[in-house]
Amino acid sequence: PVLISLHGTGGTEHDGVALARELDPTSGVIAPRGRVSEQGMNRWFRRLAEGGATHLLCIHHEQGNLSLDARCQGAGEAMEEAGGTMEIVQVDLNDAAGITSTVSATLQADDTIDAILALGPTASTPAMAALDELGMLGQMPIATFDLSPDVIQAVIDGNMAFAIDQQQYLQ
């Protein structure tokens, strides 16, 4: 197996190698340097607000899930600190077509929305379908938590700004 290590803001490609070796001494390690410069420091992804987003749409696909509530809340606080705003749209995680329709209708009704945060692939994949239908895929920043093959391909293709793979058991 091969481990991929991405450093934090201001780090270098060497920062995560020791941890990767500790996690699995037999694995290869790929540890490239971040491509984005933030105030002269390397990082991997532009922050949404610092990248120009002013009105974020948070797609919440599982009402009552406290960890997802916290993700939207944290994004809202970060947008507020940066002088932006955020709105939450509730969707049904079991209805991909409904998510696509809701995201599309929300974007058409409010042209001030300029970035999307999905709370997982269950919402991000249909949200990307909505952006594609509207001719906005790859133009409006979209980000998500958690990984799936669709998410990884969207990042590679430049259709998703970033994805956060949060491994709670490693924290």
Image (cartoon, rainbow, N blue to C red):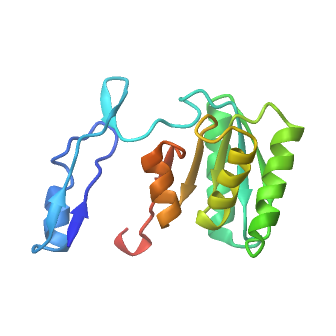
Task: Give me the residue at 69% from left, 59% from top.
Answer: 126
Task: Give me the residue at 32% from left, 35% from top.
Answer: 35
Residue 164 seen from this side: no
The answer to which quarter of the image holds residue 79 is top right
Q: Is residue 19 left or right of residue 60?
A: left
Task: Give me the residue at 33% from left, 45% from top.
Answer: 8
The residue nearer to you, when weighing 56 against 142, is 142
The answer to which quarter of the image holds residue 48 is top right
- In this view, the residue farthest toward the left is 26
Q: Is residue 140 left or right of residue 15?
A: right
Residue 167 seen from this side: yes
Give above or below for 158 relative to 96: above
The residue nearer to you, when weighing 69 against 144, is 144
Give above or below for 27 relative to 104: below
Q: Is residue 146 left or right of residue 7?
A: right
The answer to which quarter of the image holds residue 93 is bottom right
Locate residue 108, reporting x and y percent: 85, 40
